[in-house]
Amino acid sequence: MTSNFAKKNSPPKIPSFLFPWLDVLALGSWGILMIKYWLTSKLYLLIRPDFFWLVISGGFGLLILCFFKAVELLSQLRKKNTQHSTKRSTFKRISPWNWQ
């Protein structure tokens, strides 16, 4: 009875192929946020002006990491798709050629 209750109230499952993209989303969001605060002059509210260079370089660094992580995930996806399509195309005939 408890297992049936747990099935009804369990949260919906996120497909496993979306988990690596959470890294890309988080890195990009933080990078954009840091650069946005710098461009809108709200960075003065958060840190001392002596450390602006650190926040600005960190924001651009996070965006660069986001880009490389996205390229890596896309190349893995392409590699997986090409391997999957070659598996489909390898068809072996079971019966001899003269059976038709």
Image (cartoon, grey):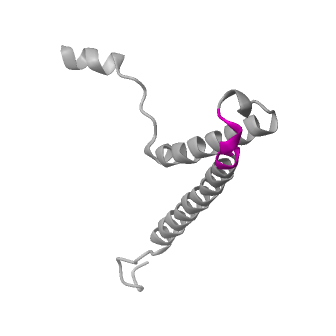
Q: Residue at x 34, y 17 (%)?
A: 8
The stretch drawn in magenta includes residue 14 = no
In depth, the one of 26 and 70 nearer the eye is 26
The picture places residue 76, in percent across and down from the top left corner, at 52, 63
Residue 91 location (% of width, % of height): 44, 74
The quarter of the picture where residue 45 lies is: top right
The picture quadrant where one finds residue 46 is: top right
Predominant SS of the magenta segment: helix
Which residue: 57% across, 65% down? Answer: 75
Residue located 65% across and 34% down the image: 47
Depth check: give the residue in front, 7 or 23. Answer: 23
Q: Quadrant of residue 71?
A: bottom right
The image shows residue 15, relative to residue 2, as above or below, that is below
Q: Quadrant of the N terminus?
A: top left
Q: Which residues are magenta?
A: 47-55
Classify residue 5 as left or right of residue 89.
left
